[in-house]
Image (tube, rainbow, N blue to C red):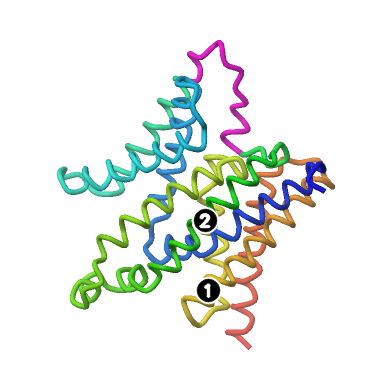
Amino acid sequence: MLDDFFIRSIIGGVGVATVVGPLGCFVVWRRLAYFGDTLSHSALLGVAIALLLQINITLSVFITSLFVAFALLFLQKSQKLSSDTLLGLLAHSTIAIGLIALSFMTWVRVDLMGFLFGDILSITKRDILIIWVGGLLVLICLILIWKKLFAATVSLEIAEAEGLNPQHSNFFFMIMLALVIAISMKIVGVMLLTALLIIPAASARHFSTSAEQMAFIAILFGISSVLFGLFSSLKFDIPAGPSIIVASLILFLFTISKNLIFKNA
């Protein structure tokens, strides 16, 4: 069954959608869209480092994203610059350095468009294994720290007062976000990855009455976007990665319109 490239794409896409749904909810709740964008942009630098050192790309992207995340936290505490200034600085600097580094590697044949906008149709069995194993690790970790992480999201002061150690939860959240970026890069690329994190979660917000319900609905919206995008790509011969994001956007617009209709009814 996995010899069919389209079936492999569906399995990989569904795996990514399953893990970005719940994690994307926390990105939306914490208003960290720009932070996620910075980490996803830094993935290209991770690719350049991997090709230069001839190491695993997923591992290199994970380590690079994690390094950028903690570098950002350090700069926020030690510098007088605002968070959005630091995010803009790191996001565009890392992707620029990555592009320049790749341009100097004339001995390496690089599919730059695949890294920037995804290449889900060329996904391999090994990629599927990495996505599902990595995704399951993130989901298990998220379930274990859900209460602490949600409490820290609602109120950092209350979480500290209850002895839930929000810094510990935030540390694991950074690790999970970096891992998700590493395993998702091949699906939609570094430029569109943040959209896959936030749009399904934002869509689910209009249909949920609890945090857990929103996370589950975000998974459903993510899977629907992947399926709709892949079949649209196959039918109309258009790029698969951007098609998934457009499908997600259409679902988001549908949720907004439906919400407005019910509100005015």
Q: Residue at x 41, y 43 (%)?
A: 39
Q: Residue at x 44, y 64 (%)?
A: 142
Q: How many marks?
A: 2
The answer to whether 93 appears left or right of 179 in the picture is: left
- Provide residue 42's location: percent of width, then percent of height: 42, 37
What amino acid is labelled 2 in the image? Leu
Q: Look at the picture and state if 138 lies above or below 63.
A: below
- Provide residue 108's location: percent of width, then percent of height: 57, 16
Query: In front here: 31 or 180?
Result: 180
Label whose residue precedes the other's in the sequence (1 or 2): 2
Q: Residue at x 23, y 48 (%)?
A: 82
- Provide residue 84's location: percent of width, then percent of height: 31, 48
Which residue is situated farthest in the top direction here? Answer: 107
**Alpha carbon separation for disc pair 1 and 2:** 13 Å
Q: Which residue is mark 2?
A: 197
Quarter of the figure with the C terminus: bottom right
Magenta region: 102-117
Q: Secondary structure at mark 1?
A: helix
Query: In front here: 61 or 97?
Result: 61
**How packed is label 2: few (under 14 Cα within 10 Å), some, or many (20 or more)?**
many
Whether residue 56 is in magenta: the answer is no
- Provide residue 36's location: percent of width, then percent of height: 42, 50
Q: Secondary structure at mark 2?
A: helix
Q: Which mark is residue 74?
A: none
* Quarter location, residue 126: top right
Q: Look at the picture and state if 261 lies above or below 228.
A: below
Q: Which residue is mark 1?
A: 214
**How packed is label 1: few (under 14 Cα within 10 Å), some, or many (20 or more)?**
many
Q: Residue at x 64, y 76 (%)?
A: 258
The answer to whether 29 appears left or right of 16 in the picture is: left
Image marks 1 and 2: residues in contact by CB distance under 8 Å:
no
What amino acid is labelled 1 in the image? Met
